[in-house]
Image (tube, grey):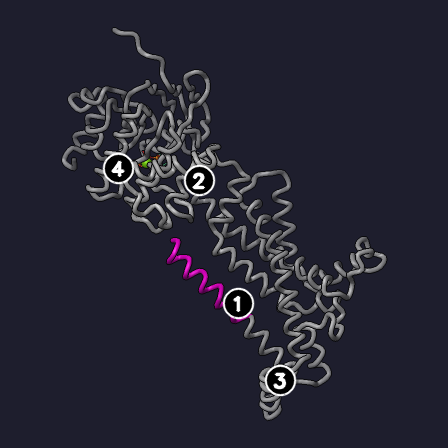
Amino acid sequence: MAERPAALLRARDLTVVLGGVTVLDRLSLEILPGLRTVVLGANGAGKSVTLRALHGLVPPASGTVEWQGGRAPRQAMVFQRPVMLRRSALANVAYGLAVNGVDGEARDRRAREAIAKVGLEAIAHRPARVLSGGEQQRLALARAWALEPAILFLDEPTASLDPGAAGEVERIVAAIAAEGKRIVMTTHNLGQARRLADEIVFIHQGRVAEQTPADRFFAEPQSQHARAFLKGELPWT
Amino acid sequence: MFEIFASLKLALDLMANGNAEFVRVVALSLELSLAAAVLGSAIGLPLGAIVAIGRFPGRRSLIVALNALLGLPSVVVGLVVYLMLSRAGPLGSWGLLFTPGAIVIAQTVLVIPIVAALARQVVEDAWNEYAEQLRSLGVGTGRAVRTLLWDTRFSLLTVALAGFGRAASEVGAVMIVGGNIDGVTRVMTTAIALETSKGDLPLALALGIVLILVVLAVNAGAYAIREWSAIRHG
Ligand SMILES: Nc1ncnc2c1ncn2[C@@H]1O[C@H](COP(=O)(O)OP(=O)(O)OP(=O)(O)O)[C@@H](O)[C@H]1O
Ligand SMILES: [Mg+2]
């Protein structure tokens, strides 16, 4: 077996308790560089909490999240329902840059570039909160993309989008990944998981049931829970 | 009944003809209330936002203090400001007692807790929605306060207008610290109190009508701002 590259991110025995309920139960996983990871699992399995914990938004009760080199790289997250600030689409992207210390001409240029890359130039100056769901999702991607994160977490980025808008978001995610940014996303759309994933992390009741290369996962899932999940879900893909 | 209608007719005459004393009282009232609303909002809005999202020692005491201030009879606020500004008081050297400045101070003290309490509610609601997104972007507490104040600006404008309404309708504290001096510190509310006690009902009634119109206009403005911003900005 070839030597595995050092993990970009390693979660060890991550336990998260929310409202007195253990929602992550000694969850362990490794995120290697250069792959696109899709996190699958039933509703309530703990996918969103896993992403939020890895991103540093939810403190673990025990266990650790370790980054390569001991220091978290620049990271971003796109939420299932992104929150847009009450200002223009372009200003939303610029805001993220400003927070991260990008000022003046560079901020302007990078914000415009990011808006263009997601195809929103025509509505760059519209108030962000009155944009459609699909447009807001693309704007959220632009805001995250502009930050040039080493790793991007996406929580069901196409959940309530029509097929056209979902396809557009998939294309953008693929483009971000092609730039070498690490993608970790959740979805309930198995067709999308097949198209985007290099590897699958399957979560069941707050634990990683398996972490498997994508083609292998869909051909022969390793865990009984994933097998049951795929049987139940396949008719809808 | 007859007397009310007679007074009403005289009141309308006063307003229509722009009686000098009447105009002066109305103008001073609006001017001082506006100043108090601006000052009270400048302090109360950030205070409300900080209490809404900040986590610091003394936060609970601050909330209790603000709530207590909210329920304090305004004559007591007037009395305290009077004591502070009186010759022997700690701020006596400012020489503000019985001047318009004293009225603005008293009104500001009354406006702050209302503005802070309403702003806190507005900002807290927004924070519930924004918190994870802002933390994800790397926003610290200071910038979060500024961002939330800006993003809730239309709601906060209506909060500031509520502060203005509070200032404009205040009588007890204004009477105590202003002294209701003709041509200097006589405002609508204190003039109404005085004229009514003297039996000059037309002037009192005319001022009362203006006060009602001002309060109505402020509320209509607040409502219109909300509607417009919801359509324009979501
Ligand atoms: N703030 C919270 N307080 C209490 N329980 C919570 C909280 N947040 C999440 N949970 C619980 O944690 C569990 C995992 O939630 P999570 O949102 O991660 O599920 P998920 O896998 O993303 O599900 P879905 O596919 O529906 O998005 C659920 O049972 C949920 O009820
Ligand atoms: Mg979820």
Boundaries of the magenta span: B215-234
Q: Nearer the viewer, residue A86 or A89?
A: A89
Three-letter residue code for mark 4: Val
Residue at position x 44%, y 21% from top?
A64
Point out the image quarter for the C terminus of chain A.
top left
Three-letter residue code for mark 2: Tyr
Q: Earlier in the sequence, mark 4 or mark 2?
A: 2
Helix, strand or loop at mark 4? helix
Examine the structure image and report whether residue B219 is included in the region drawn in magenta: yes
Three-letter residue code for mark 3: Leu
Mark 4 → mark 1, Cα distance in angstroms: 46 Å
| Residue occupied by mark 2 | A95
Same-chain status of marks 4 and 2: yes
Point out the image quarter for the N terminus of chain A.
top left
In contact (CB < 8 Å): disc 1 and disc 2: no
What count of labels does the image hold? 4
In contact (CB < 8 Å): disc 3 and disc 1: no
Helix, strand or loop at mark 2? helix
Three-letter residue code for mark 1: Val
Tell me the quarter of the picture where residue A181 sits. Answer: top left
Residue A130, x across and y down, in percent:
34, 51
- Can residue A46 be spotted in the picture? no
Q: Nearer the viewer, residue A73 or B176?
A: A73
Residue B218, label in figure? 1
Q: Is residue A2 above or below residue B93?
A: above
| Residue occupied by mark 4 | A169
Residue B14, label in figure? 3
